[in-house]
Amino acid sequence: MEFQAEKVRDNLVQNLKILREKSGFTRVILGVSGGKDSTVCAALLSRAFGRENVYGVMMPDGVQSDIADSQEVCRSLGIQSRILNIGEMHKALHAAIEADGEGFPVSYVKESDINVGPRLRMTALRYITQALGGRLCGTGNLSEATVGYCTKDGDTSCDFALLGELTSMEVVAVGLTMPEIPVHLVKKTPTDGLSGVADEVKLGVTYQQIHDYIRSGSSGDASADEIIRRKEAASAFKRHMPPIIPAWEILE
């Protein structure tokens, strides 16, 4: 079935309005990275809630080389915005973890430290969201969730997931139907903004292959399918609520 980007765009906007009416909130907050996902989310939210009710928070971890892209998104849409640098918070936490003291030792692990950024951003976004009496919009897409390319208790934490049913390729298609956002940001090469490596390089598969795997059952490349299957299985815990250990019966 051909993907109808304009229809999907309009469905999302209409469903956001329904969510607003049912839940009784008007303000929405999101992290704006300058990548395609948060850019498309910001545009959809602006259409549904009005730009005056959308708050975009830019959160560099020290120096962010493409912060101008984040600023361009907010400026193009005319949404409320601010910059909150989490660099010093990250340094303080790193120093506290590494400090000598009683208890068990914890040494530096790159992947663990990389994931601190998204978790600090989540804390900052939750702080601002509650202070404004709004709701936090999640910007992750289905492709990322499928292969676990997300941080549990970081960018997975939200009050609603706007792109959760769309693959990365479909997000781009929706974004290209909205002239209010810069095309070059919709087509921007995806990176996590943390490791300095493009997503597809780090994942070992392309977003087109992930899209085909999700929508057709196979990417057409057996080795790519295996990579995606392994990542999907290994990251299942990120897509579900934590299991509750039974108290009244023994697990079989």
Image (cartoon, grey):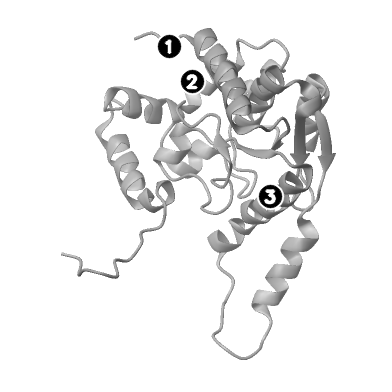
Q: Which residue is mark 1?
A: 3
Disc 2 crowd, CA 10 A, few/some/many (<14, 14-19, 20+): many
Disc 1 crowd, CA 10 A, few/some/many (<14, 14-19, 20+): few
Q: Residue furthest left?
A: 252
At horizontal 33% and vertical 42% (from top left) the residue drawn is 227
At horizontal 58% and vertical 41% (from top left) the residue drawn is 159
Say if 130 sits above or below 242 in the image: above
Mark 2 in CB contact with mark 1 (< 8 angstroms): yes
Q: Position of residue 72 (x, y in %)?
A: 80, 26
Kindly report which numbered mark, 3 or 2, lies closer to the viewer in this rendering.
Answer: 3
Disc nearer the start of the sequence (3/2): 3
At horizontal 55% and vertical 54% (from top left) the residue drawn is 153
Mark 3 in CB contact with mark 2 (< 8 angstroms): no
Q: Within the image, what quadrant is residue 188 found in?
A: top right
Circle 2 — which element? helix
Q: Position of residue 60 (x, y in %)?
A: 76, 47
Disc 3 crowd, CA 10 A, few/some/many (<14, 14-19, 20+): many
Q: Which residue is mark 2?
A: 170
Pick the front one: 15 or 175: 15
Q: Which residue is mark 3?
A: 126
Q: In the image, 144: left or right of 154?
A: left
Pick the front one: 160 or 65: 160
Q: How many marks?
A: 3
How far apart marks 2 and 1 lie (CA) works out to 8 Å
Can residue 56 be seen? yes
Which amino acid type is shown beneath numbered disc 1? Answer: Phe
